[in-house]
Image (cartoon, rainbow, N blue to C red):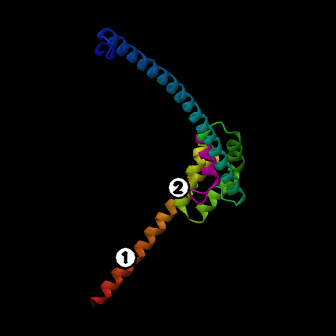
Amino acid sequence: MSRSATPAPRQRALIAVSLVVLAALAGGAYWWLHGRNAGNAAATTAQDAGSKDDSGVSILLDLAKTAVTEKRLVAPAGSNAYEFYLSVLQLDPQNKVALEQLHDSFPSASADVERSINDNSLDEAQRELALLREFDSTNYILSLLGGKLDAQRQIQIHQDEARAAIIQAQQSAANGGSML
């Protein structure tokens, strides 16, 4: 009886080898199915990323369109049409809508930069000019505006120096008059 209750060593070895082979087959099947699903998941993730890029582009285009409607071509910083369109071009360098809108709005945007220079908002004008140069660095209008900005900065420096000289003269006169 004891002999029939326990399998012979040869049978035990056969059972052990069968279990190992069965486990290897199950593992191989799992790996094959899991690897296949991971490939599908990677493809799905890539498709989702593509659609997110498309929606990101469309969101930026909508924001830019609103900014153009509200006459925010180059100002305020962070919420203007030029920054939105340039962001679209970073995501999609050949985006025809963004390129066309940047080109069409260039004359108005350069007029805004000139207004900033004339209003003596020189730091703002410098930022706006940099935006326009990011789109078209070879445009002669930008060279002219850059020259005008530099000239305005020089005028401001001379005015500041003149004011400083007047203040210094007044202080010297006040100090000299109090010594008497």
Horizontal and vertical percent position of residue 67: 67, 57
Residue drawn at x 31%, y 16% as measured from the top left: 6
- Disc 1 marks which amino acid? Gln
- Element assignment for label 2: helix
Name the one closer to the observer, 20 or 82: 20
Span of residues in magenta: 74-90
Residue found at x 67% / y 39%: 95
Q: Residue at x 65, y 55 (%)?
A: 73
Q: Secondary structure at mark 1?
A: helix
Say if residue 138 shows up in the picture: no
Q: Quadrant of the N terminus?
A: top left
**As shown in the figure, which amino acid type bears the numbered disc 2?**
Asp
Can residue 112 be seen? yes
Residue at the location (45% across, 68% down)? Answer: 160
Q: Is residue 46 or residue 33 the one in the foreground?
A: 33
Q: How many marks?
A: 2
The earlier-in-sequence mark between 2 and 1 is: 2
> Vertically, is 40 above or below 93?
above
Q: Which residue is mark 1?
A: 168
Cβ atoms at labels 2 and 1 below 8 Å apart = no
* Residue 180 at x, y percent in the picture: 27, 91
Residue 48 versus residue 128 in the image, above or below: above
Foreground residue, 58 or 147? 58
Q: Quadrant of residue 171?
A: bottom left
Residue at the extreme top? 10
Cα–Cα gap, marks 2 and 1: 27 Å
Q: Is residue 166 shown left or right of residue 35?
A: left
Foreground: 42 or 141? 42
Q: Which of the two marks, 2 or 1, is nearer to us in this view? A: 2
Residue 66 sits inside the magenta stretch: no
Classify mark 2: residues with Cα within 10 Å, few (<14), some (14-19) or many (20+): some
Residue marked by disc 2: 150
